[in-house]
Image: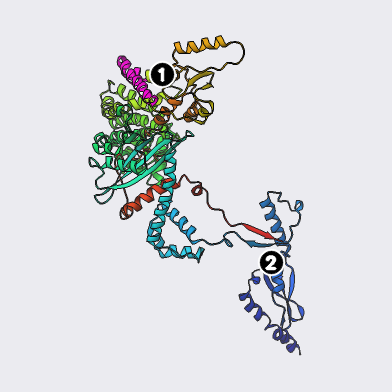
Amino acid sequence: MAGASDIEPVTTETPIPQPSRRRRKKSLVWEHFTIEAVSGGCTRACCKLCKQTFAYSSGSKIAGTSHLKRHIALGSCPKIKNQEKKMLALTSGSKTDETSCEPPPKRRYRMSGFANAAFDQDVSCVYLAKMIIVHDYPLHMVEHPAFISFVQSLQPRFKMVDFNAIEAEILAIYQKEKQSLMQVFGTMPGRVSLTIGLWTTSQTLGYVCLTGQFIDSDWRLHRRMLNFMMVSSPHSENALSEAIGVSLSDWNMKSKLFTITLDNNCSSHDIYSANLRDHLSNKNTLMLKGQLFVVRCFANILNVIAQDVIASIHGIIYNIRESVKFIKASPAREEKFAEIALQLEIPSTKTLSLDVTTQWNTTYLMLVAALEYKQAFTVLETCDDNYNEAPSTEDWKKVEIVCTYLKLLYDSANVIMATADPTANIFFHEAWKIQLELTNATLNEDVLVSSFAKDMHEKFDKYWKDCSLVLAIAVVMDPRFKLKLVEFSFSKIYGADAVRYIKVVDDSIHELYLEYVAQPLPLTPAYEEQGEVTVNNINGNQNCSGSGNDNNRPTTLVSNGDGLQDFDLYLSEMAVNQPTKSELEQYLEESLVPRIQEFDILNWWKLNNLKYPTLSKMARDVLAIPMSMVSTGSSIFASGTGSRVLDDYRSSLRPETVEALFCAKDWLQYLPTMAEPPSTAIVKMEL
C-alpha cells in the first residue's frame, strides 16, 4: 500500500503539464504567466508581475487562457497600472509621484494616423523622387532588390516604379519648381548677377553651372542655381558666352543682367565675345561702360595663392607630414614625444594633426602646430634611430614665413565664411588688407621674406587691379564707411598717388548714380497715395523727390491757414534758387553710421528706401554682386581652382536629367516641406 500511494499521485499529475507546454507554444499569454501545481492534482497560473494566481486546471479539465489575457490586456494587473500611471505622468508633464496622480481610467489603445490614412501612390512617388534629388542617390536604386523589399515591408500596396518612371518624376519636379522660381524673377525689383562654374566629365564633354544672385523687394539676399547645361567644350572661346546667352533667354532676364563672376582661369575675352552681346537685348546696356561687368572670385584667388605658397615648400611639408604620421603611429611614440616636449618646457597647447591635401586650411593648421614643436622633432631624431624626417633650422624658418602669409589668407577666408549672407561690401575690408600686407612684404630686407611675398603679390595684385573698383563701390554703399574707408585704405596702399585712385572711385560712383537717375523710377504705394511729391522725414532730414530725374523740382506747398502764405512763398522761391542736393551727395555728406557688430546693411537700406529711392536701387544691385562663387555653407578652402569633375554615374545620365538633379536639389533646400519631416502617426485613446 505504501508503494501504491507513492506512485498514485505521479500517475494522476503526469498528463497535466503536457497540455500546458503545448498551449504555451500557441499563446503569448505564457510570456506573463507560469504554471504552478497545487494540492489535489490542480494547477494554477501565476502572474510573473504581481504574483496573483488564477485557476488553470482541475484534474483533467483545463480552464483556458481568456481570463489570463484579460488580466494583462485590460490593465487589471496592479504592476501594469503603476507603469501606466508613470507613463501618463511623463507624457502629460505632471509629477511622477504615484500618490499625486489619480488612477487613470481603463482605456484601449488604437494606433491611427499612417495606419488608417489613405494611401496615395502618386504622393509616395513624389517623395521618393525628392529623396533621390536631395541626397544624391542613384536613380537606379528603385530597381535594387533590397530597396524594393524594404519599401514593400513598409507599404505593400506601393507599386515600385522603374528607372524611366522615376526619371520622369524628377523632371516633373524640376519643371514645377522652375515655374515657381520664374515668377520670383518676374517680380524682382533690381538686377541679377551671375556666377559661372565649370565642370568636366570623364568624356570630352563638360558642363557650365550658372547661378543667379539678387536682392528681393524685402531686401533679402538670394542665390539660386539657374542652369547646369552641357557644352561640347567648356573652355572654348564661345562656350561660356553661348551658355550665358541661352540662360538669360531661358529665364527672360536679358534686360536684368548686372555682373558676371568668374574664377581666375576664365578669360574676360570669353565673356565679351560678340556671341554674348547678340543675346543681350538693347535694353541691357552694361552699367558704367562695362567696367563692373566681369568680377573675379575672391575665394578663388585666396585658394590659388595658398596652394602656390604651399607648393613652394612641398618637400618640407612632406617631411612634416611624415613626422606627424610617425609620431601618431603608436601610443608609445606619442607618449615619448610628449615627454620630450615636457622636458623642453614647450608651452604649446596645440595638438599635432595630419592635413587633408585638398583643404589648404588643414595644411596650415598642421604646420602651425608642428612649428611649435620644432625643437621636439630635432631631439626625437637624435634619440630614435627609426625617425629621420626632422626639418632643418632653415626649413623651419621657411615654414614660419609661409605660416605668416597663410594666416593672412586663413583669417580672411574665415571672415567671409562666418557671414551668413555675404553682401559685396564685406570683401573690400579683406582685400585691401591683403594687398597692403603683401605690398609691404615685397620691400622687406630679408630676401627670403620678400621672395615669398613677391610671388604672392604678383597674383593678388592682378586681382586687385581687376576688382578694386567694384570692391570700393560696394563698400561706399555701406553707411558705416562710405568713401572715407576708400580714402583711408588707398592712402596706405598708394601713398602719394592715392588721390588719383580715389578720384577714379569717386567719379565712377557719380557716373553710375547718374545712370540710375536716367532710368524711370517706379512709384511705390507710398508715392501713389501722397501724389507726385513725397516729403519724407527720416532721421530728421527732409527729401523732396518725385521721379528719379526730378530731384530739383520745387515742392508744391499747401497753406495751413495760419496766415503765413508769404512765408510759404518765400520758402518756395528759396527752393528754386537753391537746387536740392542729389541723393548721392546727401548720402556721402551725412555722418557715418556707428560701427556695430550686429549691423544689418540690407535692413538699413530697407528702412532708408524712401529717403534714397534712386540710390537704394543702385545699392540693391551693387550689394548683390557675388564677390565669391562659394555658396553659403560650403567650404571656402577647397583646393580646386578650376573645373570640378562630375562623377561617372551622373556623366552617364542624359544632360537634361543631370540639370534637373542639380537645379532641383538647389531649389528644394529652400522649401519648408524639405526642412520639416512629415508628421508621424498619432495615438488615439478610446474610452
Please, what is the dominant secondary structure of the magenta stretch? helix
The N terminus appears in which quarter of the rendering? bottom right
Classify residue 537 by image quadrant: top right
The numbered mark at residue 484 is: 1
Coloring scheme of the render? rainbow
Q: Secondary structure at mark 2?
A: helix
- Would residue 464 appear left or right of 685 to someone viewing this image? left
The earlier-in-sequence mark between 2 and 1 is 2
The C terminus appears in which quarter of the rendering? bottom right
Q: Secondary structure at mark 1?
A: helix
Categorize mark 1 by other alpha carbons within 10 Å: few (<14), some (14-19), many (20+).
some
The numbered mark at residue 73 is: 2
Establish if 150 lies above or below 19: above
1 is within the stretch colored magenta:
no
Image x and y of residue 89, in percent: 69, 52
Establish if 123 lies above or below 22: above
Q: Identify which residue, 567 or 43, lies in the foreground.
A: 567
- Would residue 5 appear left or right of 678 to someone viewing this image? right
The numbered mark at residue 520 is: none
> Can residue 79 be seen in this snapshot?
yes
Q: Residue at x 28, y 23 (%)?
A: 442
